[in-house]
Image (cartoon, rainbow, N blue to C red):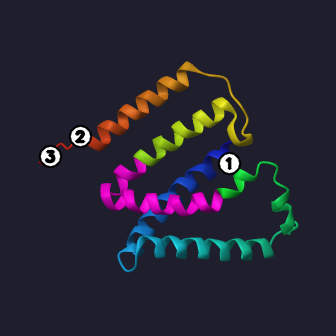
């Protein structure tokens, strides 16, 4: 379980770095060129990693039962766009804290209803209270401008 938390922390750090890097790239090109570059380099990385690991059949991807889940790449392009756009408009910290809380809220809803093949969980008032507190924290973080006026 501890390894899962460590991997999640690494994921969060990498997402923040990627957002900052991608926002910088858009200054020299455009948001869609940057997003395209991200997707192409991600594809190349995946191919290289596939070559150095066990290689299951590529055709297995088409055996997915719920075909809507194949839209992950399309969603990835829009994730890149929205992260870059929010960082350029809000700044890195405000954008990231808002993104993370939105991820938690969406993940909880997906989990509650067992959407897209995820494991369904029971409603928990403590989790809802935690989410409400987190949303309140985002509001404080985003809208409190002490010393900036």
Q: CA distance from mark 2 to mark 1?
A: 35 Å
Q: Main secondary structure of the magenta part?
A: helix
Relative to 24, is 40 on the left or the right? Answer: right
Q: Secondary structure at mark 2?
A: loop
Quadrant of the drawing holding the N terminus? top right
Label 2 with label 1: CB-CB less than 8 Å: no
Q: Position of residue 115 (x, y in %)?
A: 68, 38
Residue 43 in which image quadrant: bottom right
Residue 127 in which image quadrant: top right
Q: Which residue is mark 3?
A: 147
Question: Residue 68 got which mark?
Answer: none
Residue 86 against residue 44 in the figure, above or below: above
Q: Which residue is mark 2?
A: 144
Q: Position of residue 56 (x, y in %)?
A: 87, 66
Label 3 with label 2: CB-CB less than 8 Å: no
Q: Secondary structure at mark 1?
A: helix
Residue 124 against residue 29 in the figure, above or below: above
Residue numbers of the magenta segment: 72-97
Identity of the residue furthest to the top in this view: 125
Q: Which residue is mark 1?
A: 3
Sooner in the amino-acid sequence: mark 3 or mark 1? 1
Q: Secondary structure at mark 3?
A: loop
Identity of the residue furthest to the front in this view: 67
**Badge 2, how many Cα within 10 Å: few under 14, some, many 20+?**
few
């Amino acid at each position: 379980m501890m390894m899962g938390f460590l991997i999640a922390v690494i994921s969060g750090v990498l997402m923040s770095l990627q957002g900052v890097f991608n926002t910088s790239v858009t200054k020299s090109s455009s948001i869609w060129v940057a997003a395209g570059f991200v997707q192409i380099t991600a594809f190349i990385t995946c191919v290289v990693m596939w070559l150095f690991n066990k290689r299951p059949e590529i055709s297995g991807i088409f055996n997915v039962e719920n075909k809507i889940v194949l839209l992950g790449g399309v969603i990835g392009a829009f994730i890149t766009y929205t992260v870059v756009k929010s960082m350029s408009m809000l700044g890195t910290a405000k954008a990231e804290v808002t993104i993370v809380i939105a991820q938690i809220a969406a993940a909880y809803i997906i989990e509650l209803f067992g959407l897209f093949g995820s494991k369904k969980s029971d409603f928990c008032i403590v989790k809802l209270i935690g989410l409400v507190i987190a949303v309140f924290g985002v509001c404080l973080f985003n809208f409190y401008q002490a010393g900036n006026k």
